[in-house]
Amino acid sequence: MARQEPGAVTRITSIGAGPIGGGWSTYFLAKGYDVTAYVHDVSEEAPLRALIDNAWPAMEELGLAEGASRDRLTCTTDLAAAVAEAEFVQESVPEILDLKQAIYAQLGDLVPEDVVIASSTSGLMMTDIQAKCSTPERTVTGHPFNPPYLMPLVEVVGGEKTAPETVAWAGAFYEHAGKAPLMMTAEVPGFVATRLQEAIWREALHMVNAGEATPEQIDTAIVNGPGPRWAIMGPCMVYHVGGGEGGMEYCLEQFGPALKFPWTRLVAPELTPELRAKMVDGCDRMAGDKDFRQLTREMNDGLVAIAKALNALRASSS
Ligand SMILES: NC(=O)c1ccc[n+]([C@@H]2O[C@H](COP(=O)([O-])OP(=O)(O)OC[C@H]3O[C@@H](n4cnc5c(N)ncnc54)[C@H](O)[C@@H]3O)[C@@H](O)[C@H]2O)c1
């Protein structure tokens, strides 16, 4: 099958039934695609459908595409059958290099010629993932943010053997599907967003370890501080605006010397049993009696409210 134009794709295969594979299935169904989900074991089908049901109200709230329906989902444990009719494949199997390589070795032969295969990997290099694939030129990283059905970002980057046309096609496809692709120029560990997130994560662990802040204080600081600003502008423009008339230039001059100290202590914290316990206990206290599903709903409701507010703001200023 020749490669479809990005806007002509109608059938997608989502490989994996975890939060990410399930999240992608939800997103593509809500956007009106036919979705075939590959589940590794038949027992995964019911939890996958429950994940989609749990997320569906958020998708309805944001507006379903014409014809979108959960009935357009097919589940199978047969990888060959799962990809036979695919026009785009999004792979979301566990983050284990050997496993990804083995799957790509199979997909390289099973997926119709020229169909793009994108990996949700959050940290592995496509150059490594595609090492045992017979058709690596059509493989690419398409790293989503969790949950993929609500977060717009997808980081797109090829491996050494990926054809440039594949990267361009994937970017155009995600954009057509309503995502905000970030076309990366280099394959770097952690990509862009995860790397930034990990810097905060590392500092949070340091503070908890040193008894400087509890998990509750850290979350309060972000939710009421940088969080709301970052939904509008990223950290670079926040400083640029914060610098007043002098912009970024002024910020670097004013804060640069003071930042040298925190920058020089940014090393990985030791994950001791005590630190692990403090982090887990803090999060358990914040979760209270809410289970994973209720917390997910809470997060989804907030993300939907933010998306709606931002959509209205952009519509009124365009
Ligand atoms: N969880 C996140 O926050 C997040 C965010 C962005 C990207 N990712 C990436 O997405 C991918 C999937 O993440 P996840 O958290 O959904 O993973 P997961 O481990 O929860 O689930 C992966 C799914 O893969 C399938 N699977 C399991 N064993 C398999 C095997 N041996 N062969 C084939 N399929 C198998 C199963 O259907 C399983 O549900 C990973 O590469 C991860 O790094 C995760």
Image (spheres, rainbow, N blue to C red):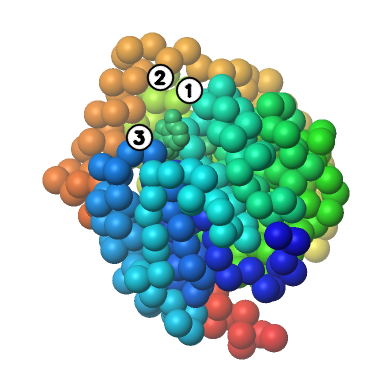
Camera sees residue 263? yes
Label 1 – label 3 distance at C-alpha: 11 Å
Q: Is residue 9 above or below residue 243?
A: below
Residue furthest to the left in view is 289
Tell me which corner region of the image, top left, top right, bottom left or bottom right, holds residue 54. bottom left
Q: Nearer the viewer, residue 90 or 218?
A: 90
* Mark 1 crowdedness (10 Å alpha carbons): few <14, some 14-19, many ≥20: many
Q: What is the total number of numbered labels drawn onto the structure image?
A: 3
Q: Is residue 147 above or below residue 276?
A: below
Indicate the secondary structure of the residue bearing disc 1. Answer: helix
Which residue position holds label 2? 209
The residue located at (24%, 29%) in the rendering is 281
Which residue position holds label 1? 206
Q: Position of residue 202 (x, y in %)?
A: 52, 27
Q: Position of residue 8 (x, y in %)?
A: 67, 73
* Mark 3 crowdedness (10 Å alpha carbons): few <14, some 14-19, many ≥20: many
Amino acid carrying label 1: it is His
Q: Is residue 32 above or below residue 118?
A: below
Indicate the secondary structure of the residue bearing disc 3. Answer: helix
Q: Position of residue 127 (x, y in %)?
A: 74, 31
Amino acid carrying label 2: it is Asn
The residue located at (18%, 49%) in the rendering is 290
Residue 258 circle label: none
Residue 215 circle label: 3
* Residues under numbered marks 1 and 2 in contact, where contact means CB atoms less than 8 Å apart: yes
